[in-house]
Image (cartoon, rainbow, N blue to C red):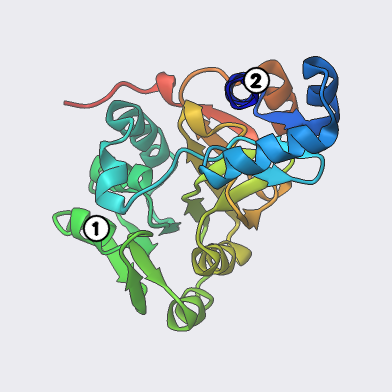
């Protein structure tokens, strides 16, 4: 009976996590009339099953981003196509742009018209997608290719990317949260992304709806380090307020039509 009750309680905790993005152990203890130690055991169980991330005092929703680049391309494909169109609209003639390894940025590369610009990327798939654009100069960052990330990471890639001063850095991420900022699952990838964005004039990222208010273990930049967020759909009022407070422009994908 106790196991059944624990299972039911954990199911309700997951429902609360999905609704709000975070839960506090103290609040859950009151709600379910159990001790905080009991709730902490529940959260350890859920985290052990990969269903949440335990933090001090409670738990947070995990980012849905997982799998290698090819797998991620198939997740929310139409939404990423819309995001890619909106990202491509930010790239202007004459600009130098770092286009980070991500499935949405790959969609942006495919949507980019043939205009004179320079694209720096650590992602072979993005470089290949731009191969048919004669006006686009592509600079490929070298190093060890991480198949999960879909791009070069490690010391060589960090050293190479640090040589450039892009007008725009378009970061990929696994989660975005007002408190946690922009995050990813790989420490080496986070280091590369920070190096790529350090000298950029502007930094933007994109997010599918399900990534909002989720986080991964490694920080890329805090929310205040971004200039813009490309998103499809409407963020909740609290999230939009956090963007405004940190002077992050909201760039809505719906403003552009998907090209055939």
Q: How many marks?
A: 2
Using residue 219 as the reference point, say whether residue 173 is left or right of it: left
- Kindly check if marks 1 and 2 are in contact, taking CB atoms under 8 A apart as contact: no
Residue 57 on image: x %, y %: 82, 40
User: What residue is rendered at 59% in x and 19% in y?
Assistant: 8
Residue that carries the numbered disc 1 in the rendered image: 125
Gap between marks 1 and 2 measured at Cα: 38 Å
Badge 1 crowding class, 10 Å Cα cut-off, few under 14, some 14 to 19, many 20 or more, is many
Q: Residues within 10 Å of mark 2 (few under 14, many from 20)?
A: some
Quarter of the view holding residue 177: top right
The image shows residue 109, relative to residue 4, as above or below, that is: below
Residue 255 visible in the snapshot: yes
User: Which residue does the image show at 37% across and 63% down from the upper left?
Assistant: 121
Q: Position of residue 242 (x, y in %)?
A: 74, 30
- Which quadrant of the rendered structure holds the N terminus? top right
- Classify the position of the C terminus by image quarter: top left
Q: Secondary structure at mark 1?
A: helix
**Above or below, 98 relative to 34:** below
Which dot marks residue 16?
2
Q: Nearer the viewer, residue 13 or 69?
A: 13
Residue 209 is situated, as x and y percent measured from the top left of the image, at: 49, 26
Of the numbered discs 1 and 2, the one sitting upstream in the chain is: 2
Q: Is residue 212 left or right of residue 114?
A: right
Picture quarter containing residue 33? top right
Q: Which mark identifies residue 49?
A: none
Vertical relation: 134 (above or below) 156: above
Q: Position of residue 205 (x, y in %)?
A: 52, 44
Task: Decide if residue 108 is on the left or right side of residue 245.
Answer: left
Instruction: Determine the secondary structure under disc 2.
Output: helix
């Amino acid at each position: 009976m106790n196991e059944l009750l624990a299972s039911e309680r954990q199911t309700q905790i997951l429902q609360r996590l999905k609704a709000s993005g975070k839960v506090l152990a103290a609040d859950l203890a009151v709600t379910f009339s159990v001790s905080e130690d009991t709730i902490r055991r529940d959260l350890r169980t859920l985290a052990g099953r990969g269903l949440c991330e335990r933090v001090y005092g409670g738990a947070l929703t995990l980012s849905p981003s997982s799998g290698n680049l090819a797998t991620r391309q198939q997740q929310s494909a139409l939404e990423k196509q819309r995001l890619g169109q909106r990202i491509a609209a930010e790239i202007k003639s004459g600009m130098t742009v770092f286009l980070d390894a991500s499935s949405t940025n790959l969609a942006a590369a495919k949507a980019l018209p043939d205009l004179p610009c320079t694209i720096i990327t650590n992602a072979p798939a993005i470089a290949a997608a731009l191969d048919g654009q004669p006006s686009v100069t592509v600079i490929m960052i070298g190093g060890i290719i991480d198949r999960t990330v879909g791009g070069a990471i490690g010391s060589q890639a960090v050293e190479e990317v640090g040589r450039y001063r892009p007008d725009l850095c378009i970061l990929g991420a696994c989660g975005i949260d007002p408190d946690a900022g922009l995050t990813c699952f790989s420490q080496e990838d986070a280091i590369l992304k920070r190096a790529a964005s350090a000298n950029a004039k502007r930094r933007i990222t994109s997010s599918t709806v399900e990534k909002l208010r989720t986080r991964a273990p490694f920080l890329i930049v805090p929310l205040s380090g971004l200039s813009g967020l490309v998103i499809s759909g409407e963020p909740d009022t609290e999230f939009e307020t956090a963007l405004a407070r940190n002077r992050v422009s909201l760039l809505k994908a719906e403003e552009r039509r998907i090209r055939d």
